[in-house]
Image: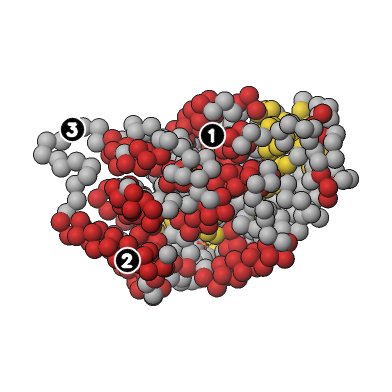
Amino acid sequence: MKETESSRTMDGKQAGMAKTVAIIGAGASGLTAIKCCLDEGLQPTCFERSEDIGGLWRFQEYDIDGQASIYRSLTINTSKEMMSYSDFPIPADYPNYMHHSKVMEYFRMYAKHFHLLERIRFKACVCQIRKRPDFSVSGQWEVVTEMNGKRESAIFDAIMVCTGHHVYPYFPLESFPGVKKFKGKIMHSREYKHPEVFRDQKILVIGLGNSGADISVDLSHVAKQIFLSTRTGTWVVNRVSDDGYPLDVVHFTRFKTLLRQILPVALVNLWGEKKLNTRFNHENYGIKPQHRFLSRYPIAADDLPNAIISGRVLMKPNVNEFTEKGVIFEDGCREENIDVVIFATGYSFAFPFIDESVISVGNNQVPLYKFVFPPHLERSTLAIIGLLQPLGAIMPIAELQSRWATRVFKGLIKLPSADMMMDDVVKKTKKNEKWYAPSQHISLQVQYVDHMDELACLSGVKPKLLNLFLTDPKLALKVFFGPCSPVQFRLHGPGKWEGARDAILTQKERIVKATKTRAVQGCTGAHAMSVPCVLIKVLGCAAIFALLLAFL
Ligand code: NAP
């Protein structure tokens, strides 16, 4: 690569030339970042260190240093309507919760449809990005890459970092006394691929996150015994929710978000805990957490209670110390002859190619305005995409971040002053620390609907509910009571998509088509609603309408 023509002028551009953007990573965030750049008339070049797209979602038989790694059975825990990119719905016959291979199929369709592959340089590892000497004027960056052992550098007007946060394993061996004398195998969950190699073994899994629960259940079909150790316990939700609809479709609505915001926290906690305990009593299953329902994200572990009730998985407290052949738990119980210990203790994140003066990560925290822009940079030409932990799907959030960032790069949206951005960061961190129980990701946590709306406001694409109720009440009802799916953010404003209305009105058909693969006589269909349900919706609607009139 040579310095491009476009990099030679002081403002980064010769008249009429589009700004160049370097995108690092071609996973779920990188793909949509390329698309958003193209939509805004920017010139993206994506650098991907592997030979394919998909990032985390591309299954590989072995874990590779510097790349995310998943297991063969992984099925996503956000549903297709809620995880799709906003102007590219997932086909109706795709399952509501997709296996990673289906997620990859969807990414390939997206990349093909929007001609994204042409913009990606595969096997190109970004080694370093550094500000140009005239950065305070041009906002430009030098990007150093390595491809086939050859180093090259090029100048870009802006950078989008889309490298994810599930690459570097968090492996807290030092917190476990005696771990060095343990003679069995110790591994991190990122090395786990499939259960067969663990047949008839006694396995201890440490950490009750989504990985710990999934891997325990997966292994429990072939292993002699699984012990699953948790320090804190957790609330467990099921992917299949009311009437068999996907959990996020049922609960991530504007109506329920409003209820959550106005009802007392204690009441919402009681409601949530009662609902989850109705399926299985968390205390009797040894899973009951110390924290309340809203204080930490639940895990989606549909089969964990089945594995516990059939004795294949035994829940255990934290490990106090390791022995040569086993462990002693905090309650004094000892388990010997353990063959393998799997640390399902999650991930840390890092940006080894960015200088600390640009972004410094400390304690798994990094100060970013709206989780995207480093506040103190002289020019807002660096965006971090997808570095957050939503209760909900990350792909649409990465897409909205990219829509916003690309318009900031173009100068169409101005960011507040560095001080104001930093105030916002501090306020958010404090709010999270107050609201959530301590965890590795506390500073990255966001609520899906609230955060999508916040980003949408910044880009001018938040649905105008009052207008909708007056002009298109049928659609307004779906937008308010139905799933707050990404397509809602294509109804108006920059990037408006003509297919958005229809995609919202046909959401339930797409959901049901994937499960109703056998026609059933006498079935009332996807739109069946009980009389009380209709009544509640009508009353709710009237109340909201009155509220909107009062406030606007
Ligand atoms: P995680 O969510 O960070 O959970 C790691 C768990 O390890 C913690 O909840 C904690 O559990 C335990 N832990 C952490 N530090 C520990 C320590 N020092 N000692 C003992 N235990 C410790 O990590 P993850 O489960 O790998 O998930 C990573 C991300 O991938 C999450 O966003 C998750 O939602 C996602 N994921 C999704 C799927 C899916 O879609 N199906 C599957 C897997 C992962 P305790 O407090 O219980 O001890």
Residue at 47% x, 32% y is: 106
Residue at 59% x, 28% y is: 116
Going by the image, does 472 lie left or right of 164?
Answer: left
Q: Which mark is residue 546?
A: 2
1 or 3: mark nearer the eye: 3
In the rendered view, tell whether residue 414 sits above or below residue 118. below
| Residue type (three-letter) at the residue carrying disc 2 | Ala
Q: Are marks 1 and 3 in contact (CB under 8 Å)?
A: no
Q: Tell whether circle 1 marks a residue whose Cβ is less than 8 angstroms from ligand 1.
A: no
Task: Mark 1: give few (<14), some (14-19) or many (20+) Cα within 10 Å.
Answer: many
| Residue type (three-letter) at the residue carrying disc 1 | Phe
Q: Tell whether circle 2 marks a residue whose Cβ is less than 8 angstroms from ligand 1.
A: no
Residue at 69% x, 46% y is: 411
Provide residue 98's location: percent of width, then percent of height: 41, 38
Q: Which mark is residue 519?
A: 3
Q: Which picture quadrant has residue 142?
A: top right
In the rendered view, tell whether residue 293 sits above or below residue 203. below
Res. 467 visible in picture: yes
Q: Which of the marked residues, 1 or 2, is nearer the chain's N terminus?
A: 1
Q: Which picture quadrant has residue 377?
A: bottom right
Marks 1 and 2, how far apart at CA: 50 Å
Q: Which of the marked residues, 2 or 3, is nearer the chain's N terminus?
A: 3
Question: Which residue is labeled 1 in the image?
Answer: 59
Provide residue 253's location: percent of width, then percent of height: 37, 55
Task: Mark 2: give few (<14), some (14-19) or many (20+) Cα within 10 Å.
Answer: few
Q: Nearer the viewer, residue 538 or 291?
A: 538
Q: Are marks 2 and 3 in contact (CB under 8 Å)?
A: no
Task: Mark 3: give few (<14), some (14-19) or many (20+) Cα within 10 Å.
Answer: few
